[in-house]
Amino acid sequence: MSDRPVGVFDSGLGGASVLREALIRLPFENYVYYGDNGNVPYGDKSEYEITKLAFECAYFLIGKGVKTMLIACNTATSAAIRAIREKLDIPVVSMEPAIKPACSEPGDGKILMMATAATTRLSRYQALKARMPDPGRVIDIPCPGLVDRIETGVFEDDAFDDLLYRFLSPYHGQKIDSIVLGCTHYVFIKNAISRYAALHFEGKPRLVDGNAATVRQLERVLVSNGLNNSAGKASVDFFTSGDADRLRPLFFSLLNRA
């Protein structure tokens, strides 16, 4: 047992969607969250830059005395998870785009994997896709600009049609079985993506994300290492490299967003 907090970091506010799952499933843990909003988005950066920033986030959380760490960012995981695990002496849980559950569902339509440009090009994700039963069924959709808009606090269902058209219009009229939300930010605009998909794709695409599975893995890691807490109160301390006065109320509103 350990009453030290769980550390969570992301390139910005997207990791709040994962932390929200953790607060529900692991309500007796306490949490420290670090959003690297001063450097968001990671998706347009090089692997070297992303790795450097991810280490800065990780060491910030180490300085806060965390007992384990959750990288709530698919892009940071793709670039840096191996190096971070080699350097840190605490357990590190990571994210990856949820193409495995999407591919496990029967169907003859395509699977659209929406993510940052960096996630789609990095070798860790490409190796994951290559292990799928039919990799050709998965279409990678880099989505530059989505994270930037979400970070401003825009979430209305019709506020993303221009960007979604830019990314998804080549697949209008096609049968799409699933849309994988390969960035934790995108979970906050599920309704916008569902609305757009219903208007433009054949079938009823499922939206799939890896948040719940990642939190289940966090729980397993805590228990197996004897680090779980039975007396915490789901407290959350928020830190950011950006404008804390502006971002703090937005962050906590996202934790309560349905």
Image: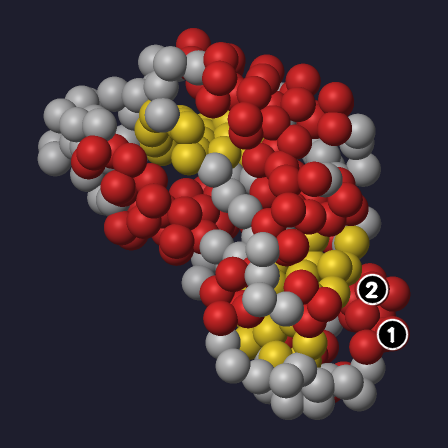
How far apart are the alpha carbons under marks 1 and 2?
Answer: 8 Å
Q: Is residue 160 visible?
A: no
Quadrant location of the C terminus in the rendered image:
bottom left
The kind of residue on which mark 2 rests is Phe
SS at circle 2: helix
Q: How many marks?
A: 2
Residue 223 versus residue 165: which sits nearer the camera? 223
Residue 23 position by quadrant: top left
1 vs 2, front mark: 1
Which quadrant is home to the N terminus? top left
In percent of the image, x 25 and y 33: which residue is there?
222
Q: Please provide percent x and percent y for residue 203.
A: 64, 89
Disc 2: CA contacts within 10 A as few (<14), some (14-19) or many (>=20): some
Going 43% across and 10% down the picture, which residue do you hit?
Answer: 63
Name the foreground residue: 226 vs 192.
Answer: 226
* Residue drawn where x is 20% and y is 34% of the image: 224
Checking the image for residue 167, the label placed there is 2
Between residue 47 and residue 197, name the one nearer to us: 47
Residue of label 1: 170
- x and y percentages locating residue 118 in the rendered image: 75, 41
Q: Does the image show residue 25?
A: yes
Under mark 1, the amino acid is Pro
Tags 1 and 2 in contact by the CB under 8 Å rule?
no
Please tell me which residue is depicted at 19% across the width and 23% down the height of the picture.
Answer: 3
The residue nearer to you, when weighing 111 against 169, is 111
What label sits on residue 249 in the rendered view?
none
